[in-house]
């Protein structure tokens, strides 16, 4: 399996993602600079967390127009799996690969803490090693993490089973109290129509090693290796 991690100016989780991928794949991913126009042959493309271009204009908006994103969009539309984490999720919405937008948190504050997520489905390349309906723990670290879309789009995501993860409590119940940022319908991550693109606000790569106090995130990378190797 070959993976590429796209690095933007302001990315700060690119190395974390690379470490998690290497642990799962047994080989280091290729780090691709945002200014490149060519992308190596890749079974997986990962857009990491961080603050691309300092979040100027709005989060992910400038990164979506980086030269490499033209090739990322082309590969995604051709079926190459793409995982966008945190800022990467923002870039995916800004580039049109996923619907909706990530807005300022309802609290208007930066939030950094662990959250609980309900796994909505486990029949995709990203979630095979999770239990459907199970609860996992991932960290969040964002100020613009409130997922917003209009009601018609939200209904379409629900009807097409494209919600990947929701913020929930320890029992897996989706509640307002468990929602850290005000995201519509507690949405923490969504798929595209073919389930080959996943945008996820929490950080699986930050809990992918027992030394980091948890391994729930490692299962996402193991799922990808299991499916794509």
Image (cartoon, rainbow, N blue to C red):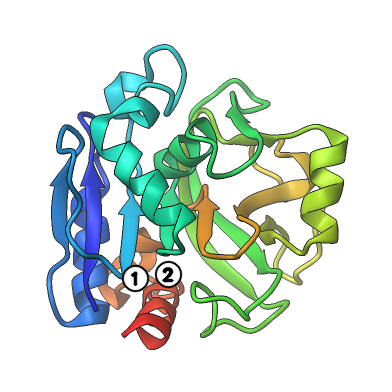
- Residue 58 badge: none
Q: In which quarter of the view is residue 132 placed?
A: bottom right
Q: Residue furthest top?
A: 57
106 left or right, relative to 197: right
Q: Quadrant of the N terminus?
A: bottom left
Where residue 5 sits: x, y (%)?
24, 54
86 left or right, relative to 133: left
**Tag 1 residue:** 208
Q: In which quarter of the image is the C terminus?
A: bottom left
Where residue 153 sits: x, y (%)?
79, 41
Which structural element holds mark 2? Answer: loop
* Residue at left offset 70%, top offset 39%: 183
Where residue 69 sits: x, y (%)?
33, 38
34 left or right, relative to 128: left
**Tag 2 residue:** 217
Is residue 203 among what the camera can see?
Answer: no
40 left or right, relative to 173: left
* Residue at left offset 64%, top offset 40%: 99
Where residue 98 sits: x, y (%)?
58, 44
Closer to the camera in the image, 196 or 226: 196
Give the vertical position of 23 relative to 206 (above or below): below
* Residue at left offset 16%, top offset 32%: 35
């Amino acid at each position: 399996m070959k993976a590429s991690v796209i690095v933007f100016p302001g990315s700060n989780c690119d190395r974390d993602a690379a470490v998690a991928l290497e642990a799962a794949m047994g080989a280091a991913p290729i780090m691709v600079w945002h200014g490149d126009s060519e992308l190596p042959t890749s079974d997986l493309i990962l857009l990491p967390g961080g603050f691309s271009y300092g979040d100027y204009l709005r989060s992910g908006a400038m990164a979506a127009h980086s030269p490499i994103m033209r090739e990322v969009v082309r590969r995604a539309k051709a079926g190459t799996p793409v995982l966008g984490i945190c800022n990467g999720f923002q870039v995916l919405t800004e580039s049109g690969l996923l619907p909706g937008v990530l807005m300022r948190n309802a609290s208007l504050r930066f939030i950094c803490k662990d959250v609980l997520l309900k796994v909505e489905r486990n029949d995709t390349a990203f979630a095979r090693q999770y239990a459907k309906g199970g609860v996992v723990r991932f960290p969040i670290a964002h100020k613009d993490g409130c997922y917003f879309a209009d009601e018609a789009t939200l209904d379409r995501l629900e009807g097409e089973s494209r919600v990947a993860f929701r913020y929930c409590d320890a029992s897996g119940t989706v509640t307002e109290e468990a929602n850290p940022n005000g995201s519509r319908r507690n949405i923490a991550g969504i798929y595209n129509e073919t389930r080959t693109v996943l945008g996820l606000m929490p950080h699986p790569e930050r809990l992918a090693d027992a030394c980091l106090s948890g391994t729930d995130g490692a299962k996402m990378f193991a799922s990808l290796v299991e499916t794509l190797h």
